[in-house]
Image (cartoon, rainbow, N blue to C red):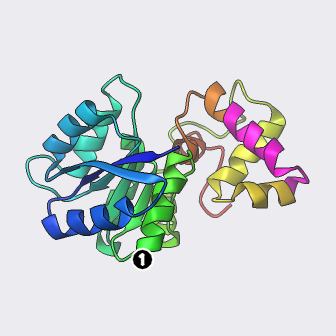
């Protein structure tokens, strides 16, 4: 299935470069561009892409506000992949809470860009190691929103899987840790998302930390 992508960035050369490369991929189609956050919201509603590549710093409306509007639209929302640089990691926590599915560093290679689009389109969370460190630091600073405890509605095994997801483990790593097949882990993750009304793994990570199920350093 072809992944339909909208590129939102105020730099024309960046949009052109991304469009040219992604358009050359057999499984990816660039359906539109936006030069600011307000245009990104409008174009998303019009074109209904699967993935939005969203810059953070844009005129008229920034990428975080645009992400919030897109996710609050009530329509089936696309995955939002935030374009960031190392000095913008302060935005990580708020972007995830706004509904972003991951982050792509602007110095990423062309192949990393294409793979990032595929990863978030498939419902996975995309967090670079530097971004993950910043995210954990934010949770350490603010602390959980609710006391530690097992989450309602999910089983003990699903809780174990969620803890490992929140620690950034892949399905393969979780399978090895819990002596399960990768397909079984994938099934558990799907059930966790459905039971907790979460969109993807990125939201699951935020939820696990905010509820105190996982704490920084564990």
Which of 139/183 is in front? Answer: 183
Chief SS of the magenta region: helix
Residue toward you, 168 or 101: 101
Task: Check if residue 25 falls in the magenta segment.
Answer: no
Q: Is residue 7 above or below residue 18?
A: above
Residue under label 1, please give it. 109
Q: Position of residue 24 (x, y in %)?
A: 39, 64
Q: Would you place residue 73 above or below residue 183 in this image?
A: above
State the residue at coordinates (67%, 51%): 165
User: Is 18 in front, or is 74?
Assistant: 18
Q: Which region of the structure is painted magenta? A: 177-191
Residue 116 appears left or right of 34: right
Examine the image and state in which quarter residue 41 appears. Answer: top left
Considering every residue shown, the one lying at the far right of the view is 179
In percent of width and height, residue 194 lies at 63, 28
Q: Is residue 90 visible?
A: no
Q: Is residue 160 left or right of residue 180?
A: left
Residue 75: x and y in percent read: 36, 24
């Amino acid at each position: 299935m072809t992944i339909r992508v909208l590129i939102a960035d105020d730099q024309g050369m960046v949009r052109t470069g991304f469009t040219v490369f992604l358009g050359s991929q057999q499984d990816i189609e660039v359906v539109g561009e936006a030069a600011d956050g307000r245009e990104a919201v409008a174009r998303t509603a019009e074109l209904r892409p699967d993935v939005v590549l969203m810059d953070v710093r844009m005129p008229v409306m920034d990428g975080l506000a645009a992400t919030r509007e897109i996710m609050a639209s009530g329509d089936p929302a696309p995955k939002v992949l935030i374009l960031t640089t190392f000095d913008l990691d302060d935005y990580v926590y708020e972007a995830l809470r706004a509904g972003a599915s991951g982050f792509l560093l602007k110095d990423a290679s062309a192949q990393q860009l294409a793979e990032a689009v595929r990863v978030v389109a498939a419902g996975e969370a995309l967090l670079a190691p530097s971004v993950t460190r910043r995210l954990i630091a934010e949770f350490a600073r603010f602390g959980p929103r609710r006391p530690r405890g097992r989450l309602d509605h999910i089983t003990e095994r699903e809780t174990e899987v969620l803890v490992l997801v929140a620690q950034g483990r892949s399905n393969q790593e979780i399978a090895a840790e819990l002596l399960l097949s990768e397909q079984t882990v994938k099934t558990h993750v799907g059930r966790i998302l459905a039971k907790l009304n979460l969109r993807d793994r990125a939201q699951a990570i935020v939820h696990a930390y905010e509820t105190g199920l996982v704490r920084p350093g564990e």
